[in-house]
Amino acid sequence: MDSNQSYSVAQAQFAQEAQRLRAQVAFTWPQEAARLRGWGAAESAQFLELGSGPGYVTERLLDLLPAAHITALDLDPRMTTYADEMLGDAGGHRTGLTASIMALPLPDASHDFALARYLFQHLSDPVGAAREVWRALAPGSPFVIIDTDDAWSILLDPPFPDDQRQRLAQAMHQALRGGNRFVGRRLPHILSHAGFRVTHFETILLHSELVGSAPFLDALAPLVGQEEGVEDSRAKALRAFVAEHHPLVMLQLFAARGIKS
Ligand SMILES: C[S@@+](CC[C@H](N)C(=O)[O-])C[C@H]1O[C@@H](n2cnc3c(N)ncnc32)[C@H](O)[C@@H]1O
């Protein structure tokens, strides 16, 4: 079993983190939804969502795929309880499970599409996790992983002072807990080593000229895994910097699709 140590949310910050995840998905979802639709999700009857968090992505998936049944799984019981309270069984279209991606409580070949969003950066054995997803998928099913790579994720112009050093500190903090904030570049490797045929590897790009800078701040400011004081002061400094300098902001996500052949 993998531990959940790379993703640790203190109880006092749980509600704030749930709202951050809500803001994050609202911001990038239109582009992600277009990829998922084009990559076969619209034909899914048994959809598997791994690391489903507080349920805001599941909520979007239920809208996008009204005919599908969604199995939404997360290791943290606080996340599954929050999602259960918000979504229930969605009229028979959702089942919430508390379990690890490393040991799925699901029969072989029971699902026909899988999605893991912002989960793989927290896993110490990403290939092992992808192999377990492979087992739960029927032959021909797609597995989509969406995640970040800190070397190529956010750009501010003019730059936020000390940003590089702070981001490196965060990446090291997560790595010490078994995670990898540079996982984006490895997604094709992870999929192919788990037995998937990699069909797509793309970036999803957002720019402040198109969406404004507020969504970037709402989605990114708190840094999970840092001590409370550090998070708060960095978030405040970032907000003040954006208000004063109106930087151009670009954000990039990585999306890979593999097929179980
Ligand atoms: C950053 S959150 C992303 C939540 C959601 N996918 C989203 O995009 O908003 C990562 C989630 O992965 C879950 N997680 C971490 N390790 C896990 C594991 N081994 N198995 C299943 N879920 C895990 C965490 O509990 C957390 O809810």
Image (tube, rainbow, N blue to C red):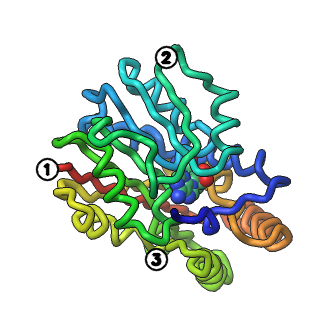
Q: Across the whole image, how many numbered discs are drawn on residues?
A: 3
Horizontally, is 72 left or right of 4 in the view? left
User: Which of the two labelled residues, at mark 2 and mark 1, occupies the earlier sequence position?
Assistant: 2
Bin the neighbour count of mark 1 within 10 Å (Cα to Cα): few under 14, some 14-19, many 20 and up: few
Query: Mark 3: few, some, or many residues within 10 Å (few <14, many ≥20)?
Result: some
Instruction: Give the residue at mark 2.
Output: 92
Residue at left offset 45%, top offset 74%: 182
Between the residue at mark 2 and the residue at mark 1, the CA separation in whole angstroms equals 30 Å
Q: Is residue 211 visible?
A: no
Q: Position of residue 26 (x, y in %)?
A: 56, 40
The Cα atoms of the two marked residues, 1 and 3, are separated by 32 Å
Would you name the residue on which mark 3 appears?
A: 151
Q: Which residue is mark 1?
A: 261
Residue type at numbered disc 2: Gly
The type of residue carrying mark 3 is Ala
Q: Which residue appears farthest toward the top when viewing the image?
A: 91
Q: Are marks 2 and 1 in contact (CB under 8 Å)?
A: no
Query: Mark 2, residues whose alpha carbon is within 10 Å: few (<14), some, or many (≥20)?
Result: few
Amino acid at pointer 1: Ser
User: In the picture, residue 89 is in which quadrant?
Assistant: top right
Q: Dot 2 lies on which element?
A: helix
Instruction: Quote the CA–CA distance across marks 2 and 3.
Output: 41 Å
Provide residue 118's location: percent of width, then percent of height. 50, 56
Using the rendered view, name the quadrant where residue 113 is placed: top left
